[in-house]
Every structure is written in structure tokens, then in C-alpha cells.
Image: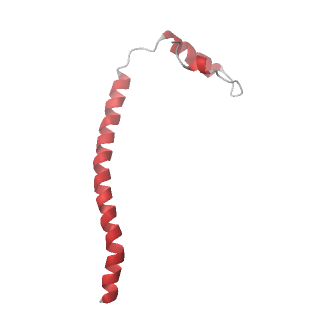
Amino acid sequence: MNELLTIIGNVGFPIAISAYLLIRLEGKLVDLTAVIGELREAILVLPAAPAWNSSLAYNLSSTSPKEVVSPSQIYPPT
């Protein structure tokens, strides 16, 4: 009987903590899933990309892997 109580004491606490953390994490995952869905919808309704962005996409797709693209080509002019 003593061994059984020791086993429950050694294993039961980690199981209880794991269950508690999983329950808390589930709520956060549900919230994150909802926010990711909202972000997807926001991205879908964005207006068309500005002219500098489309030319950048063409320039980046036509560069060879050895060519280096400067940050001024990636970020919009301020």
C-alpha cells in the first residue's frame, strides 16, 4: 500500500499540472485561431499593391541566387 501511495504521489502531481496547462493552452489556441482567421480576412481585403511593390516583386523574381538585393529595393521609399 505504501508503494502505491508513493507511485500516485510521484506520478499524480505531474499529471495534474499537465492537465491544468493543457486546459489553459486550449483556450489560448482557440483565441489564436480566431485572430489568424481575422488576419487572413484583413489581408484578403487589402487594396492593390503600390507600384513600387509590384516592380520589386518582378526585380526579386528575376535575380539570381548569387545576386544580393539591397534593403532599399525591399522597403518603400520614405
Q: Residue furthest top?
A: 51
In percent of the image, x 31 and y 73: which residue is there? 12
In percent of the image, x 35 and y 30: which residue is there? 39
Please tell me in which quadrant of the rendered image residue 3 appears. Answer: bottom left
Does 24 appear above or below 53? Answer: below
Q: Nearer the viewer, residue 25 or 41?
A: 25
Coloring scheme used: secondary structure
Percent from the top left, x then y, of residue 29?
A: 32, 46
Q: Nearer the viewer, residue 22 or 46?
A: 22
Please tell me in which quadrant of the rendered image residue 35 appears. Answer: top left
Please tell me in which quadrant of the rendered image residue 6 appears. Answer: bottom left
Does 46 appear above or below 29? Answer: above
**Quadrant position of the N terminus in the picture:** bottom left
Percent from the top left, x then y, of residue 22?
A: 32, 57
Q: Residue furthest right?
A: 66
Percent from the top left, x then y, of residue 55?
A: 56, 13
User: How many numbered marks, from 0 up?
Assistant: 0
Residue 65 is left or right of residue 42, and the answer is right
Does 9 appear above or below 47? Answer: below
Q: Residue furthest bottom?
A: 1
In percent of the image, x 35 and y 35: which residue is there? 36
Percent from the top left, x then y, of residue 25?
A: 32, 51
Does 50 appear above or below 16? Answer: above
